[in-house]
Image: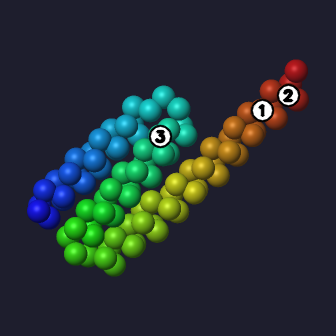
Amino acid sequence: MSSVLLAVFLILVLACSLGALIASRPLFSIMAMAAAGLCLALAFLVLQAPDVAVAQLLFGTAFPVILHLFALRATVGLGERGRSDGE
C-alpha cells in the first residue's frame, strides 16, 4: 500500500513540476510549484520521514512560494507604475 502511495505522490510531483514549466502565467507556475512541493512532502511522510517532510514544507515549499509571490507582486507593480508614469 505504501509503495502505491509513494508512486502516486511521485507521479504527482512530476506532473506538477511539468505544469510549472509549461504554465503560461507566472501565478499558475507558482501554484504548480507549491503543489509539487506539497506532494513531495507527502511522499516523505509515506517514507516515514516526518522531519524531512516538515523541512520540505517550510524550506522547499512555503518560503520559495512566498518569495516568488512577493517578487511577482513587485514586478507587476513596477510595470504598472512605469506605464502610468510614461503615458
Q: Residues within 10 Å of mark 3 (few under 14, many from 20)?
A: many
Residue 45 percent across, percent down from the top left:
27, 70
- Viewer-side residue, 2 vs 61: 2
Name the residue type under label 3. Answer: Ser
How would you rate the neighbour count of disc 2 (Cα within 10 Å): few for under 14, some for 14-19, many for 20 or more? few
* Residue located at (38% from left, 56% from top): 37
N-term-proximal mark, 3 vs 1: 3
Q: Give me the disc on residue 45.
A: none
Residue 87 in the image: above or below residue 9 = above
Crowding around mark 1 (Cα neighbors within 10 Å: few <14, some 14 to 19, many 20+) is few
* Disc 2 target residue: 84
> How far is the residue under mark 3 from the one under mark 2?
27 Å
In the rendered structure, find residue 29 and report the number of the disc placed on it: 3
Contact between labelled residues 1 and 2, with CB atoms less than 8 Å apart = yes
Q: Secondary structure at mark 3?
A: helix
Rendered view: 50 above or below 39: below
